[in-house]
Image: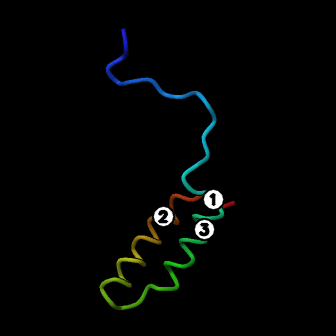
Amino acid sequence: MDSPAGSYSTAPRLPLVTLEEAREAVRLLRHFADDSPEGQEAGVWAADVALRLPSE
């Protein structure tokens, strides 16, 4: 009988983004952060994502 949750592939998968790509995204978001509502949102989001990244 099939599982109600379905089955998942055991094949290796690539991450959604690499660590390098995530750091570049944070850098670009910080670049666009300013006093506009969108800029403030970019700054908040960049800070949140940056806290989740390993330091090295």
Marks 3 & 2, CB-CB < 8 Å contact? no
Nearer-N-terminus badge (3/2) = 3
For the residues labelled 2 and 1, the Cα–Cα distance comes to: 11 Å
Taking 55 as reference, is 38 left or right? left
Disc number at residue 49? 2
Label 2 sits on a secondary structure element that is helix
Instruction: Name above or below for residue 31 compared with residue 17.
Output: below
Q: Residue type at mark 1?
A: Leu
Marks 3 & 1, CB-CB < 8 Å contact? yes
Nearer-N-terminus badge (2/1) = 1
| Nearer to the camera, 34 or 55 | 34
The residue depicted at 54 percent of the width and 79 percent of the height is 28
Furthest toward the top, the residue is: 1
Furthest toward the front, the residue is: 1
**Colour theme:** rainbow
Q: Which residue is mark 3?
A: 23
Q: In what quadrant of the picture does the C terminus appear?
A: bottom right
Disc number at residue 19? 1
For the residues labelled 3 and 1, the Cα–Cα distance comes to: 6 Å
**Quarter of the figure with residue 18:** bottom right
Q: Residue 3, how many percent across, how many down?
A: 36, 16
Q: Residue 46, how many percent across, how many down?
A: 47, 72
